[in-house]
Amino acid sequence: MHQEHHVNSSETIRDIVIGMSDGLTVPFALAAGLSGAVNASDIVVTAGMAEIVAGSIAMGLGGFLAGKTDLDHYHSELKREYDEVERLPEQEQEEVKQIFAEFGLSTDLQQQIANEMSKDKDKWIEFMMRYELGLERPDPKRAKKSALTIGASYIVGGIIPLSPYIFIHDATEALSGSCIITLIALFIFGYFKSKLTGQPPVSGAIKVVVIGALAAGAAFLLARAINNNH
Amino acid sequence: MHQEHHVNSSETIRDIVIGMSDGLTVPFALAAGLSGAVNASDIVVTAGMAEIVAGSIAMGLGGFLAGKTDLDHYHSELKREYDEVERLPEQEQEEVKQIFAEFGLSTDLQQQIANEMSKDKDKWIEFMMRYELGLERPDPKRAKKSALTIGASYIVGGIIPLSPYIFIHDATEALSGSCIITLIALFIFGYFKSKLTGQPPVSGAIKVVVIGALAAGAAFLLARAINNNH
């Protein structure tokens, strides 16, 4: 068999990307925004840490619930398919035929497929789950792993833009440091993310940097405008 | 034909859910966290607005890029499939047979399917795209719509927890107001979200409320701890 050719990034990598992409961007932009309004780094650090905790919990638990929901959804649909195959086998055979009718197979061949498919009920139902409903059997441990991976990646990502504010008291000075290391981190992150998802890495990296810079710039301008109005 | 039974929430609803779920949770938790550290609502409002701008841009543009990436990915895989069907038709026929071998169809029937399928090249490739690679043709306007929907939902969600801080100067008092309206809003949001995605609505609503409360509580405790160390 020839090797299948498309890039299929694993679910863990997807979770790291989800967590880190927001973790690098949002605390960075928030800290930049606050630097436009307050001079002392203390408040920026406090707000930034509060944001990192809030964001990692919200995203991590969000990932956990999403995983649990997928699992529940899969099992309720599976039960429903077993039920339907039991009660209305002709209708389910009709659905198999329908799938192949769409791809232009002859009625005769559709019927043969439906007949053979219905001999093994488990495989028949697996086929319906996958190709009629588009559902893959999810890993039951996924939800927990997903929550931890997303949450931890958010924290790791968020510490990077915040670190200069921890060491430099003047918020405006810390902002320059934060911009430099975060834009570099965003570039590296964007580069590997694009590589892993089969995109052109340099243009992918630039896109990620631009998003971060836009978000931070907008937050900075808005926070300064609010502050000037006081 | 009998009506297909599963709930399939539209993509716009999915985008509203993505934006609003983070929009309600993260600014709420950030504002709660800051109230544990500063007394004046001004800073909470400034930080909260900076967060909303940062979050809506980061998530909106993130959604835009994700949509664009899906589109690019689809077209590059489509091109590759056309290419392979042209150059290695036997191998692609082998892949069709492989799909049906998994579901226990006889070699004879596998061969018939592969033969008939390969008569219409476009449909054959559409079949491979959908059932071998699991890719649906994406809507080319999706990326832009998705970005706007996610961003706007984030802003709408974020304004809710922040509004008490705008009107009440004392941050601790504003916090109580923010908790009340946000937990109610999270419950309503969780209720409809669960309904639309076919989950039990009340338990779904409670889960969403618990995530928001946990994130806000953790942010509050952490911000106060940081502040007490100064």
Image (cartoon, coloured by chain):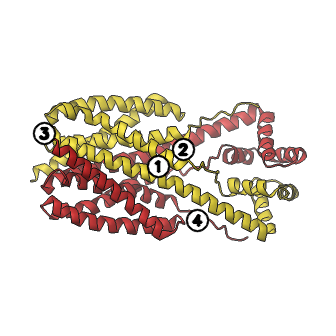
Chain colours: A yellow, B red
Q: Position of residue B220 (x, y in %)?
A: 25, 53
Amino acid type assigned to the residue bearing label 2 in the image: Leu
Residue at numbered disc 3: A40
What residue appears at the point 54 percent right and 33 percent down from the top-left corner?
A198
Q: Are marks 2 and 4 on the same chain?
A: yes
Q: Residues within 10 Å of mark 3 (few under 14, many from 20)?
A: some
Q: Are marks 3 and 4 in contact (CB under 8 Å)?
A: no
Measured along the vertical axis of the image, is residue B11 above or below residue A42? below
Q: Are marks 1 and 2 in contact (CB under 8 Å)?
A: yes
Label 4, secondary structure: give it: loop
> Image check: B73 left or right of A218?
right
Residue at numbered disc 4: B7
Asked whether residue B11 appears in the rendered view, the answer is: yes
Q: Residues within 10 Å of mark 2 (few under 14, many from 20)?
A: some
Residue at numbered disc 1: B143
Measured along the vertical axis of the image, is residue B211 above or below residue B68? below
Label 1, secondary structure: give it: helix
Residue B71: image tag: 2
Q: Earlier in the sequence, mark 1 or mark 4?
A: 4
Q: Position of residue A188 (x, y in %)?
A: 40, 28
Which tag is nearer the camera, tag 3 or tag 4? 3
Q: Are marks 2 and 4 in contact (CB under 8 Å)?
A: no
Q: CA distance from mark 3 to mark 4?
A: 51 Å
Q: Earlier in the sequence, mark 1 or mark 2?
A: 2
